[in-house]
Image (cartoon, grey):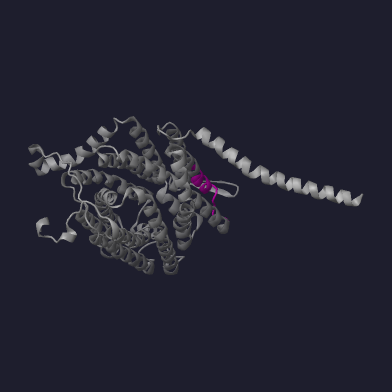
């Protein structure tokens, strides 16, 4: 149906204001409540256990971490679509809807194919298609929201949206962990035949997540489309391309985007930092879960709480603090401080052993709180930087180029992490109360990459940002002014009391 036959309410609008704008923003927030419930259902210990039951080895877990980053190349296609049509609403609904509903197909894989290489291959194919559709929808959604939500309230809106949806994420994660602990047979191996109740439980969680995830894009049908200027190259040479040339264009377009964006020195430095820091995150991503569940002895609920609840709480505790510091001092100092803090989380995991489980939970929870707090600073600074590039000409191209370069680091991290873990399978060294295995080698690689990212952030240009040296001086000065008067006030008070006592004694 053409736009001429649609009602006025669904035609693209130049802008949305007043009551309609407030209603649209509420709808987007409510939609994400279902979206974050979907995210909580398909991530966490249930995903790790599901893959083990399919027969995953450590290399397969590395591929699992790498596939979503490889699918990021689809964002170049989405950017081309935006520039040639200007339409975002219905592609977002279709791509995101199919992306979420495919989790029903993932849940059906073990019931039709059992376990083994055939089931793993089909799982990877469905998972890859879902990831590609997600990345097709992502830049379209962000571009749509950037035109819908006014800049003056954008930061406050997304902060409020995160605060309102975080409790849903926490409750869903805890509920899933409780169900998994009740369903698992502790003494039985992690196979489909030995854990039938656990399999049904995990697949039921995936189905619930897929159905709730579908509601998210469907609710966006109530949000008005915003017309966007078409920046297409309408030359005849581009209109009549055949199927083969179209496939070649899908490969050439990302290269052209990255090559054009890399001419900007500031963007090049930021992109390299993003690639390295993403590598450090992806190289150990799945193996933190495997180490906690299989080596340390975490329960399913305990792992979900440590990694997903504690990390979320840590981020919520400091997200506004990072925002104020970013506005006051600039983006580069926050990026440096948060990256330095992110180094400490994998360091803590080097000293978590299965001997004392309570201590292991305390240390793991502390590491996740630190990690969530620091990564929230990294993400906030990265978002501010990319939004700065987005205000220049060809904004969608900078966003896509940054995503593609970051994806290179994420893909390399998953593949290298899986290969190293599989090559060192069975490796173990003990020293006193500590035991280190092949997963700890991955953690060392993540630490080294994060240290390298710190030096990249130090050399990153950021016009208008305060030097980190001045910030540290200011922090020491504030600490001195806040601590010393209180300390000397107590000393003076104590001295006065002793003086009064001496006078009374004489």
Q: Between residues 364 and 271, which one lies in front from this camera angle? A: 271
Q: Residue at x 16, y 60 (%)?
A: 8
Is 291 covered by the magenta stretch? no
Q: Position of residue 368 (x, y in %)?
A: 49, 52
Q: Between residues 28 and 50, which one lies in front from this camera angle? A: 28
Residue at the limit of the structure toward the right, as seen here:
506
Is 354 drawn above or below residue 231 in the view shown?
below
The part of the image, by quadrant, that contains residue 308 is bottom left
Q: Position of residue 427 (x, y in %)?
A: 47, 46
Is 351 covered by the magenta stretch? yes
Asked whether residue 25 is in view, the answer is yes
Asked whether residue 438 is in view, the answer is no
Q: Between residues 451 and 470, which one lies in front from this camera angle? A: 470
Q: Position of residue 26 (x, y in %)?
A: 32, 61
Quadrant assignment for the N terminus: bottom left
Q: Residue at x 56, y 35 (%)?
A: 473
Q: Residue at x 18, y 59 (%)?
A: 10
Q: Residue at x 21, y 57 (%)?
A: 94
Q: Is residue 37 left or right of residue 305?
A: left
Residue at the limit of the structure toward the front, as seen here:
18
Q: Between residues 435 and 483, which one lies in front from this camera angle? A: 483
Picture mark count: 0
The part of the image, by quadrant, that contains residue 32 is bottom left
Q: Is residue 309 left or right of residue 153?
A: right
Stretch in magenta: 343-355
């Amino acid at each position: 149906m053409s736009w001429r036959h649609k009602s006025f309410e669904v035609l693209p609008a130049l802008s949305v204001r007043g009551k309609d704008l407030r209603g649209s923003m509420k709808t987007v927030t409510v939609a994400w409540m279902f979206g974050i419930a979907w995210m909580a259902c398909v991530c966490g210990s249930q995903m790790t256990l599901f893959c083990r039951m399919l027969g995953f080895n450590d290399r397969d877990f590395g591929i699992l971490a790498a596939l979503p980053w490889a699918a990021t190349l689809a964002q170049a296609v989405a950017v081309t679509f935006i520039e040639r049509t200007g339409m975002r609403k219905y592609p977002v609904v279709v791509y995101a809807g199919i992306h979420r509903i495919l989790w029903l197909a993932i849940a059906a894989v073990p019931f039709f194919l059992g376990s083994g290489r055939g089931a793993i291959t089909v799982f990877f194919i469905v998972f890859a298609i879902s990831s590609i559709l997600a990345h097709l929808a992502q830049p379209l959604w962000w571009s749509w929201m950037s035109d819908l939500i006014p800049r003056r309230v954008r930061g406050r809106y997304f902060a409020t949206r995160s605060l309102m949806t975080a409790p849903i994420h926490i409750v869903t994660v805890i509920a899933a962990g409780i169900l998994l602990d009740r369903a698992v047979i502790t003494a039985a191996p992690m196979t489909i035949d030995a854990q039938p109740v656990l399999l049904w439980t995990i697949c039921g969680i995936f189905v619930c997540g897929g159905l709730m995830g579908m509601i998210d894009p469907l609710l966006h049908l109530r949000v008005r489309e915003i017309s966007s200027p078409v920046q297409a190259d309408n030359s005849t040479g581009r209109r009549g391309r055949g199927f083969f040339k179209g496939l070649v264009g899908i490969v050439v377009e990302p290269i052209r985007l990255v090559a054009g964006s890399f001419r900007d020195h500031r963007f090049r430095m930021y992109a390299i930092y993003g690639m390295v820091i993403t590598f450090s995150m992806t190289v150990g991503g799945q193996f933190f879960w495997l180490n906690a569940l299989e080596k340390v002895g975490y329960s399913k609920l305990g792992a979900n709480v440590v990694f997903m609840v504690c990390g979320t709480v840590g981020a919520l505790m400091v997200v506004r603090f990072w925002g104020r510091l970013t506005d006051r001092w600039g983006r580069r100092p926050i990026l440096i401080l948060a990256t330095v803090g992110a180094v400490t989380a994998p360091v803590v995991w080097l000293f978590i052993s299965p001997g004392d489980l309570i201590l292991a939970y305390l240390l793991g929870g502390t590491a996740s709180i630190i990690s969530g707090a620091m990564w929230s600073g990294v993400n906030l600074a990265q978002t501010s930087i990319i939004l700065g590039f987005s205000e220049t000409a060809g904004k969608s191209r900078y966003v896509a180029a940054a995503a593609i370069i970051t994806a290179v680091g994420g893909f390399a991290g998953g593949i290298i992490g899986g290969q190293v873990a599989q090559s060192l399978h069975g490796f173990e060294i003990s020293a006193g109360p500590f035991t280190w295995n092949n997963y700890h080698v991955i953690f060392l690689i993540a630490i080294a990459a994060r240290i390298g990212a710190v030096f990249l952030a130090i050399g990153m240009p950021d016009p208008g940002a305060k030097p980190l040296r001045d910030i540290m001086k200011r922090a020491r000065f504030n600490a001195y002014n806040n601590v010393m008067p209180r300390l000397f006030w107590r000393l003076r008070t104590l001295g006065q009391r002793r003086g009064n006592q001496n006078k009374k004694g004489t």
